[in-house]
């Protein structure tokens, strides 16, 4: 293991020169303490393994860091060598400006000046990469380590097996809290939380859309599931949409006597009234006939919806009663 690269990096001079030895000696800079345990973590990264690439070395070092409750990130490339620092460290900032008068944006950061640093360097023979450690002060964190792994991106998430489980349960219409409980039971070491489930389900929907926007995907799914659908546009903007499942149409034509309609008021992302049309069977069971989005609740919009409902019923069928809430 080599441990003198920090000296050379301090001044950029040749560390073999006796003339600059005193300048190159490491200087202990006092740091603010944010709950440091005072442990030198460099021995955790001692290895004789030669890695095939810098990325392979980084993955190895990152896994070692995660097992010790902190995170490593790529800091910089210098002269063909990769520097890895603690995620709570920070680059040199503020050079060349007056820090007393400089305006800082109102931002939040986890950085606290942690000096933990290791290096991934090519082997001398040019074949492979190895881990290079620095002096002790670059192996100690000035902050407390991670206590709760949930929510830390490198320490929690969904593995391929967990993603497949989420995909299968989502296809079975399982609720997110049920999916989360199943993932936590089968993959307890992954520290999964509810946000992981939501994010992955959202990515699944985006991938399934294959680049289509929301309206195009809406119509694509309607056609794919054989929905009866009617769309009204004004100036190339969808203002009305009417959807009915084929099974619902069969139930409507079998039990057309009582129809109920109720409209919610702007409770969707598009701020459009959403109208539900329901029927009733002789066993007093409700069933959904159709639903519609409308740009407003005017008589014209309701007339358009009723015209489409009439197309489902046919001219020979007449409901006995239509129940509304003063729609």
Image (cartoon, rainbow, N blue to C red):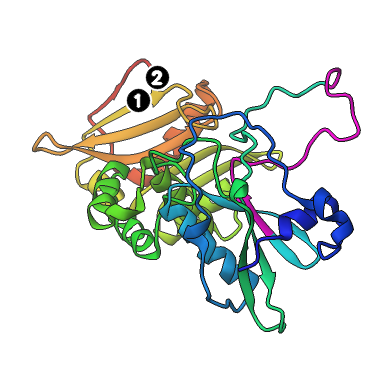
| In this rendering, position of residue 304 left or right of residue 255 | right
First-in-chain label (2 vs 1): 1
Instruction: Name the mark on residue 262.
Output: 1
Counting every numbered tag in the picture gives 2
Instruction: Give the mark toward the camera: 2 or 1.
Output: 1
Q: In this view, does 84 lie above or below 144?
A: below
Q: Quadrant of residue 109?
A: top right
Tag 2's secondary structure?
Answer: loop
Mark 1 packing: few (<14 Cα in 10 Å), some, or many (20+)?
some
What stretch of residues is rendered in magenta? 83-102
The rendered magenta stretch, by its main secondary structure, is classed as loop
| In this rendering, position of residue 186 left or right of residue 53 | left
Instruction: Name the mark on residue 166.
Output: none
Question: In this rendering, does residue 139 appear at all?
Answer: yes
Q: Which of 63 and 13 is in front in this view?
A: 13
Q: For the C terminus, which image quadrant?
A: top left
Q: Nearer the viewer, residue 198 or 308?
A: 198
Q: In which quarter of the image is residue 5?
A: bottom right
- Can you give x and y, in whole percent of width and height, for residue 102 in the image? 84, 22
Q: Nearer the viewer, residue 229 or 67?
A: 67
- Can you give x and y, in whole percent of width and height, for residue 172 in the image? 28, 56
Mark 2 packing: few (<14 Cα in 10 Å), some, or many (20+)?
few
The residue identified by callout 2 is 327
Q: Which of 58 and 218 is in front in this view?
A: 58
Q: Quadrant of residue 162?
A: bottom left
| Residue at (45, 26) in percent of width and height | 267
Marks 2 and 1, Cα distance to the nearest angstrom? 7 Å
Most extreme residue toward the left is 283
Contact between marks 2 and 1 (CB within 8 A): the answer is yes
């Amino acid at each position: 293991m080599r441990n003198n690269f920090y000296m050379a990096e301090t001044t950029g001079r040749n560390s073999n020169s006796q003339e600059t030895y005193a300048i190159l000696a490491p200087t202990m800079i006092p740091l603010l303490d944010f709950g440091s345990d005072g442990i030198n973590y460099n021995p955790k990264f001692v290895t004789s393994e030669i890695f095939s690439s810098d990325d392979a070395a980084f993955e190895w070092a990152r896994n070692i860091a995660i097992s010790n409750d902190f995170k490593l990130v790529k800091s910089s490339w210098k002269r063909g060598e990769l520097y890895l620092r603690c995620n709570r460290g920070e680059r040199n900032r503020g050079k060349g400006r007056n820090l007393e008068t400089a305006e800082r944006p109102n931002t939040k950061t986890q950085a606290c000046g942690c000096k933990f640093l290791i290096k991934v360097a090519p082997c001398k023979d040019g074949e492979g990469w190895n881990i290079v450690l620095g002096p002790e002060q670059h192996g100690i964190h000035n902050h407390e380590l991670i206590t709760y792994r949930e929510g830390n991106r490198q320490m929690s998430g969904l593995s391929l097996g967990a993603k497949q489980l989420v995909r299968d349960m989502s296809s079975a219409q399982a609720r997110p809290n049920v999916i989360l409980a199943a993932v936590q039971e089968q993959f307890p070491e992954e520290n999964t939380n509810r946000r992981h489930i939501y994010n992955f389900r959202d990515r699944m929907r985006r991938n399934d859309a294959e680049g289509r926007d929301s309206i195009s995907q809406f119509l694509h799914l309607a056609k794919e599931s054989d929905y009866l659908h009617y769309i009204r546009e004004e100036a190339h903007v969808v203002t009305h949409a009417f959807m009915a499942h084929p099974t619902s149409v069969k139930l409507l034509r079998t039990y057309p006597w009582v129809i109920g309609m109720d409209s919610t008021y702007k409770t969707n992302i598009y701020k459009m009234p959403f109208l539900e049309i329901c029927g009733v069977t002789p066993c007093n069971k409700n069933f959904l006939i159709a639903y519609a989005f409308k740009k407003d609740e005017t008589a014209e919009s309701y007339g358009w919806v009723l015209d489409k409902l009439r197309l489902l019923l046919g001219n020979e069928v007449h409901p006995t009663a239509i129940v509304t809430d003063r729609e």
